[in-house]
Amino acid sequence: MPLPLRTGRPWVLALVLVTGVGPLATDTYLASLPQVRASLGTSSTVVQLTMTFFIAGMAVGQLLAGPVSDGRGRRGMILGGTATFTAVSVLCAFAPTGWTLVAERGVQGLVAGVGVAVGRAVVSDRYAGPRAAAMFGTLASFSLIGPVVAPAIGSALLTVGDWRTVFLFLGGLGVLMTGLAFLGIPETLPVERRQATGLHDVGLRMRDLIGDRAFVAPVLVQCLVSAGFFVYIGGSSIVLQSQLDLSPGRYALVFASNALVMVSASVTFRLLVVRTGAAVLRRVALTVAISAGAVLFLVCLVAPDHTPALPLVWAPLAVMLGGLGMFLPASTAIVQAAGRRSAGTAAALGGGVPFFVGALTTPLTGLLGSQTVLTMASGTFFFYVLALLAAWRFRHLTPDDRPVRDVTLIEPELVGHP
């Protein structure tokens, strides 16, 4: 039976959930990892694989779902993804073995990735220019709240249940997400604008975008920035707790406060972008991030034994992540604008490829052989420098997108603020 056709503007809350469920499904589960190992009688390696497979599944889900949605439409794929997420979350709650949970988490990540890519395509279908960028800023603001609140939610759930309760909670969240998507996300890609769905046709769309320097340039910059960001994600827990003697509680405070700075920066982007354009704010954000990264690197370099005091690490990290909080929605808006002709494929490449690159650099601090703040700062600063060089090299491919008129919605009946 065909899904009922709904028209109009997408509900922001529905888009927030389908594009931001990934961080919630990742970080809500973190506190229960020791329980999973003990309950299922498995190894730490298998338990860690439940995280790895979820992250890899999200990347693959974006790469697969985006191009397919250019041919089949957005609404059905989002509803199918949210319903499957709900069912798999419940299955995870009853997983009998560690390897079963690994496989189910991979599927859960896959369908979470569907929402990320197709949700971005929905925004590109309905909005253009700074209005689209403003919507991406709104989505980024809520998505970045996930790493702040999710660990607390997970810990609270463990006080009334065990690790299986966490997955039942995610199942309930999936029910809410499916209901809101059904009511609030219309079909934004009319049949007459859809493209062929065969593998050959999908390959042609990908080749078209990959061959377009105006599209590849911002994706390359985002890949390099993601690489630097994931060096921080992968190394901060170990180096801050081991070298700077932070307790788990103090590290959680540092991590959460930095995440809140990112949220504040993305809200600032949302407020400014309609007047300034995404390209200007991306330049500002990248300059702020690389300047803070340089300060962190120099502080670590000159400190006695390369071990600076916590405030001298915390402050530049917070500023650097503030720059990233503004950079991410700006980059997404620029990538989606460049690939608007195949919005789903653009969302897949612009989201999935940087995610893969970032995942590859996550263990870099350990692979360099020295688990120190200086090593983490060096890796982060190195990738940011490359990102700045790439942005400068291809600056002529990113047009000034400041609006001439304050009307940048695609459909006349949708004029208004997102």
Image (spheres, rainbow, N blue to C red):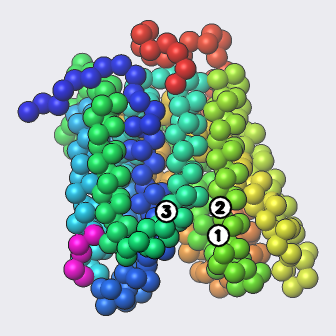
* Residue at the extreme left: 1
Q: Is residue 93 shown above or below 280?
A: below
Per the image, label 2 sits on a secondary structure element best described as helix
Rendering coords of residue 249 (x, y %):
66, 75
Amino acid type of the residue tagged 3 in the rendering? Ile
What range is drawn magenta here?
Answer: 93-97
Numbered label attached to residue 256? 2
Side of 292 relative to 329 (left or right): right
Residue at the (52%, 15%) spot, across then down: 416
Residue 413 percent across, percent down from the top left: 42, 10
In the image, 298: left or right of 371? right
Is mark 1 in CB contact (under 8 Å) with mark 3?
A: no
- Residues packed near mark 2 inside 10 Å, few (<14), some (14 to 19) or many (20 plus): some
Image vertical order of residue 161 relative to residue 195, above or below: below
Q: How many marks overall? A: 3
Marks 2 & 1, CB-CB < 8 Å contact: yes
Which is more toward the observer, 405 or 203? 405
Instruction: Please provide percent x and percent y for residue 234.
Output: 58, 71
Q: Which residue type carries mark 1?
A: Ala
